[in-house]
Structure formats: structure tokens, C-alpha cells
Amino acid sequence: MCDCPYETVIGNKTKGTSQSFTFRSFLPMIMMGELRVTEKHSAIYRMNPKGSNFSTAELTSFQTVISGNDYEKIDKKDNPEIVKAKLRGQIEELSHMIDELRIENANLEAKNEIKDGQYLTKKIKETNEFIDSKNEEVKKYEIEFEQLQTESDVIKRKIYRLNDNIDKFHLLKKNYLSDLERLEFIFDAHDLTQQLVDVECPICHSHMQVEEAESSNDYFIALSSERTKIEIQLSELDDTISDMQSEVEEEEQILKDIEIKSELISQEVNTILLPVISEKFAEVQALLEIQEQVNLILRKDHFSSHLVNGR
């Protein structure tokens, strides 16, 4: 609130201590008793501290306010005896830590049968080899799956072509049936016209004229031959359509078998192999962490031996 930027004043020059500059640092300059006012020396700048414990702080606070220069914080110098005591305590703490690490090292060796990390190295190698073998299986399944998908695409295209041809043959069959209906109509019309009585036309009084070609036996023999030919073509066409439909069913069954096999491969990879690989990978990570701990313990044990020998 006073917009004061000062932070530090000297508390004791002899001991080399410092303290924070607070609002109470202003008190000797703004609040004083009657006896202090009537003394011979300055009321706010006491040259003679007269045994006061706060005289140094009051003097440096006054100098700070007058000069505007803050005192830098002085780090208290440690007593040599205190430093030695701290070092002895640190050495004892290190010795205690070394003992704990030795116990931890012994427990790890007993638990994991560790001898210079050889067991862990062997175990990690075996697990990695197992993972590699499973990865190879996954790759083989992936190649087989891709081959099945390629085969499936070929069969789907073949089924599409067969169905397209079947549709075309059905359309051709309709044309053949239409031709048969036309021929049957001609035969029926001839039978009907043969039953008609030859009478004169009531308008032109002319007799009904029948083309010679349409009344000849060769004409009807040709029509019969055409009908027989169409019937044979229809029969062959039905056989072809039936064969194609059977082929479509066979290809669809093959496609279904491929889909089943692909699903089995997908299940084998996703539900069996990949979880096993993931589990073994996690096991390797755990073993690597243990190996790192063992190496750290061995290094610390080696360091502790040098430390003890040196001490």
C-alpha cells in the first residue's frame, strides 16, 4: 500500500544474518517515545545502539529508506562443526541406503533366480523369440487372408458375369417363346381359314384370295421346321441357364467357404495371436524394468563397496 520496493535489511552483521523489510521496519522512524525524543543523539538515526538487539536492523532500514538502495540477502555462513555433522549424517544415511539396496538385491536374486542378470537376459531373449514366432504366424495369416480376399473378388466378379448372362438368356428365351407364339398363331389362323366358306365379298363381290405360298405344303413344312428348331434352342437354352445357375450356386458356396475361412483367420489373429503377443510384449517390458532395477542395484552395490573401502 505504501508502494515500498524494499525487501531485505541486515539483522546482525556479526553473524551475517538478514531479514525481510516489512512495515515494522518503518516504526523506529515514525513512532517513538518521549525519552527517545529528549535524548542527545538523533531520534531516527541512532549512532549508539546501547545494547539494543534491533539497532542494526533499525540503522540499515533508515539507510535503505534514505538511499533507496535495498540490501541484498546475505546467506548465513554455516559453522564448520555443523558442516562436518551434516556430512557425517549424510554418510550414515548413505550407509543405511546401501544396506537397504543390498537387502533388495538379495530379495530380487532369491525371487527371480538372478545371477548377474543372466536369467533375465535369457528370459527376455526367449520371450522376444516367442513374440517373433507369433508375429511370423500373424504375417502368414495376413498373406492367406489377402489371398482369400483376392480369390473372393474374382469369384464375385464371376458370379456377377454369370448372373448377367442368365438375365440375357432369360431375355432370349422370351424372344424364342414369342416366336413360338407367332408360329402357333400362323398354324391356328390357317386352320381357321380352312374352315371358312368361300363367299363373295359383300362390297367388291370378289372371292377371298389366298397366296399360293401360304397354301403350299412346303410353307407349312418350313414353319414346322422353324418351330422344331426354336423348341430345340429353347431346350438347350434351358439347359444352359440351369447349368449357369448351378455354377452360380457352386461359386456362391465357394464364396461362403472363403468368408468362413476369412472369419476364422480374423478370429485367430484378433482373439488369440494378437492378445498373446500383447501379453508377451508387456511381459518383456516388465522384465526390462526388473533388469534395469537389477543393473541399478548392482551399480549402487559396486559404488557402495568403493565408498566403504574409501571411508
Image (spheres, helix red, strand yellow):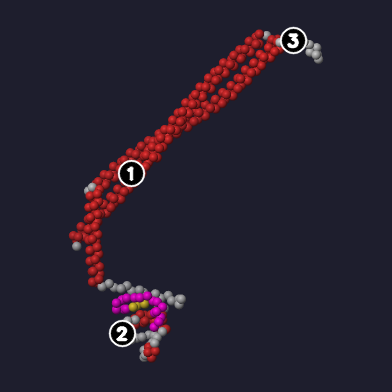
25, 249: nearer the viewer? 249
Q: SS for tag 2?
A: loop
Q: How busy is the neighbourhood of tag 2: few (under 14 within 10 Å), some, or many (20 plus)? A: few
Q: Is residue 10 above or below residue 98?
A: below
Mark 3 — residue? 197
Distance, label 1 to label 2, CA atoms, is: 78 Å
Mark 1 — residue? 280
User: In this rendering, which labeled residue sits more in front, label 1 or label 2?
Assistant: 1
- Residue lying at the far top in this picture: please name it: 217
In the image, what residue type sits under mark 2?
A: Gly
Q: Is residue 165 above or below residue 196?
A: below
Q: Residue at x 69, y 14 (%)?
A: 189
User: In this rendering, which labeled residue sits more in front, label 3 or label 1?
Assistant: 3
> Of callouts 3 and 1, which one flags the residue occurring earlier in the amino acid sequence?
3
Q: Position of residue 64 (x, y in %)?
A: 39, 79
Q: Residue at x 31, y 41 (%)?
A: 129
Mark 2 — residue? 51
Is residue 24 shown in magenta? yes
In the rendered structure, which segment of residues is drawn in magenta? 12-28
Image mark count: 3
Left or right: residue 161 versus residue 40 is right
> Of callouts 1 and 2, which one flags the residue occurring earlier in the amino acid sequence?
2
